[in-house]
Amino acid sequence: MKTIEVVAAIIHHDGKILATQRGYGEFKDGWEFPGGKMEPGETAEDAIIREIKEELEVEIKPEKLLVTVDYDYPKFHLTMHCFISSIVSGHILLTEHEAAKWLLPSELETVDWLPADVEVAEKLKEYLAGKNH
Ligand SMILES: Nc1nc2c([nH]c(=O)n2[C@H]2C[C@H](O)[C@@H](COP(=O)(O)OP(=O)(O)OP(=O)(O)O)O2)c(=O)[nH]1
């Protein structure tokens, strides 16, 4: 099976986390962490900064790799590196997504995540809970 390598940004601001809803394609209407496919020769950090500039028109700083998830979709294998990130400059403008929501840690289970993201949301919740202690 073909593997695609993707980067995703877990953007935090004022104690909330950004979730975005896919506006087109196979997974239309599913909720995800914004991002996309890595390009040849790119580091994961470079890729996530580029993708977020394209999709949300903000500059981010990837601060920490929370998790790399591997997930078997019926047609491909996904390897996705998920970076906790902060906004460095700009205002969010959705250029590709149909909606976005800022979620409190307690609200992370309230959106219909893409299958690969369920594990990411769980890990994130644990990570954020640990940070409060
Ligand atoms: N960006 C992103 N993609 C995810 C997540 N979860 C998940 O299963 N995916 C899957 C959906 C897609 O098959 C793939 C990402 O591809 P993409 O279509 O966003 O990549 P891209 O921006 O480079 O798009 P394109 O130029 O090929 O249209 O990863 C997630 O949280 N964020």
Image (cartoon, helix red, strand yellow):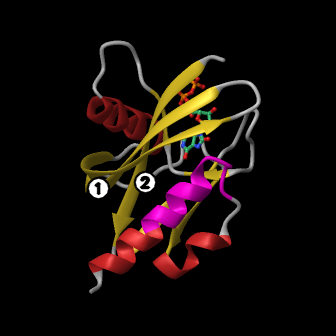
Furthest residue to the top? 40
- Residue 104 seen in the current view: no
Secondary structure, magenta segment, majority class: helix
Q: Which residue is mark 2?
A: 92
Residue, x 57% and y 32% (percent of image)? 78
Q: Residue 87 bears which disc, if any? A: 1
Q: Is residue 122 above or below residue 14?
A: above
Helix or strand or loop: what does disc 1 sit on?
strand
Looking at the image, which is closer to me, 88 or 113?
A: 113
- Asked if residue 118 is among those painted magenta in the image, a careful observer would answer yes
**1 vs 2, front mark:** 1
- Residue 19, x across and y down, in percent: 54, 59
**Residue 113 at x, y = what percent?**
66, 56
- The image quadrant that residue 47 belongs to is top left
Local packing at callout 1 (Cα closer than 10 Å; few below 14, some 14-19, many 20+) is some
Q: Is residue 132 left or right of residue 29?
A: left
Residue at the (28%, 77%) spot, across then down: 131
Q: Quadrant of the C terminus?
A: bottom left
- Quarter location, residue 118: bottom right
Instruction: List x then y, in percent, for residue 108.
Output: 56, 71
Amino acid type at circle 2 is Ile
- Up/down of 36 relative to 58, above or below: above
User: At x 42% / y 34%, what residue is drawn?
Assistant: 51
Q: Which amino acid is tagged 1?
A: Ile
Is label 2 in a helix, a strand or a loop? loop
Nearer to me, 84 or 14: 84
Q: Residue at x 72, y 36 (%)?
A: 24
Q: Are marks 1 and 2 in contact (CB under 8 Å)?
A: yes
Q: Which residues are magenta?
A: 113-124
